[in-house]
Amino acid sequence: MLFGRNPLRWLPAFTIKAVAFPGTRITDTRYLDSQDISGTPPQQYTEALAFIKRNLHRVQGSQGFNSPGILEVPEIALQELLVNALVHRDYFTSASIRILVFTDRIDIISPGHLPDSLSVDDIRHGKSNRRNPTLSEHAFRLLPYRGLGSGIPRALDEWPQIELIDEVGGNQFTARVQRPKAQWVRAGEQATEQVEAPVEAPVEAPVELTETDKKILAVLAARPLGRSPLLSHLGYRQPTGNYKMAMTKLLQARLIELTLPDKPNSRLQQYRLTAQGKDLLK
C-alpha cells in the first residue's frame, strides 16, 4: 500500500468509495457526485479531501462581502478524520472506506471497530492503540500524521459537531460530521427543511462563475443536451474534474436541471437551463 505502483491490482478492496447525495438518506437513488479513489494512501488522502471540499459550501462567516468564502467545515478537522481512517482502518477486512456527503452531514466510515479495549471516550481524550504498526510507522513521512493520538481531539477542537460511532456488530467505525445550517437564514426567519435534492432547495447561486461554468451555461442556452453531446461541445472526451465540479455547482445553484429528475440514470437524460440560469446568462 505504501510503495507499490498499483497496489489495488492485488488489494482491490483497499479503496475509498465516495458519494455525494442530494438529500439525507443513503437509500436515495440519485447522487450529485461519485468517485472511486484508488492508489497509495497519500494519493487516496489527496483525492478524498478534494472530493469532500468540492461538495461542501464556502460561506461568508464574519468576512466581508468580497471575501472568497471559507469552507463550511474546518479543513483541519476533515484532514484529521481522513488520516485516521486511512491509517487505522482494519486492512484484514475486505471492505472499502466510504465517504458519504449528505446535505446535513458527512459520514467517513472505516472498516473495523475500535481495536482491543479502546472506547469512543478514550479516543476523544487522546488515547490510541496502533492497529497497523508498520503502516503508522511510515505514515508520518507521507501523511499529516504524528501517531500521538491527538488527531481526534484536534478535529473535535476545530469542529465539536462530530459524532464518533463504534459499531462492533457491523465491524466499522464512523466519524459523522454535522454540516452547519445555511448562514443566510436571518434570526426570526423560518428555515424550510428539505429532504429532497438541493437542486430544489433554496441555495445561493455562485457569486463568481468559472470559465467552465460559463461555457456549460452558454452551450445549454441553445438547447438541452445529454452528457455525451455536452462533453463534445465543451471539447472533452471524458468527464474531467473541472467538468464534474462545475456540473455539481450549477445543479446545486439551480442554474441547470435534469429533464428527467425522477429517472437520473435514464439514457434519455438531458441537462437544461432553469429560468434562474437563463436570467443569470442574460
Image (cartoon, helix red, strand yellow):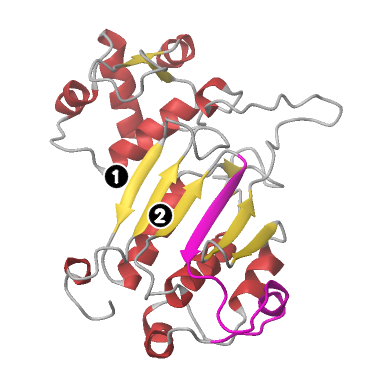
- Residue 152 sits above or below residue 202 on the image: below
| Quadrant of the rendering where the C terminus is positioned | top left
Indicate the amino acid at tag 1. Gly
Looking at this rendering, what residue extends furthest in the right direction? 188
Asked if the residues shown at circle 1 and circle 2 are in contact, with their CB atoms under 8 angstroms apart, the answer is yes
Residue sitting at 71 percent across and 24 percent down?
A: 192
The residue that mark 1 highlights is: 241
**Is residue 55 shown to the viewer in this render?**
yes
Between 76 and 129, which is closer to the camera in this rendering? 129
Residue 138 sits inside the magenta stretch: no
Mark pair 1, 2: CA separation: 10 Å
Residue 268 image offset from top left, x and y in percent: 24, 15
- Corner quadrant of residue 143: bottom left
Local SS, label 1: helix
- Corner quadrant of residue 12: bottom left
Between 279 and 32, which is closer to the camera in this rendering? 32
Residue 258 image offset from top left, x and y in percent: 38, 18
Local SS, label 2: helix
**Is residue 74 shown to the viewer in this render?**
no
Indicate the amino acid at tag 2. Ala
The residue that mark 2 highlights is: 50
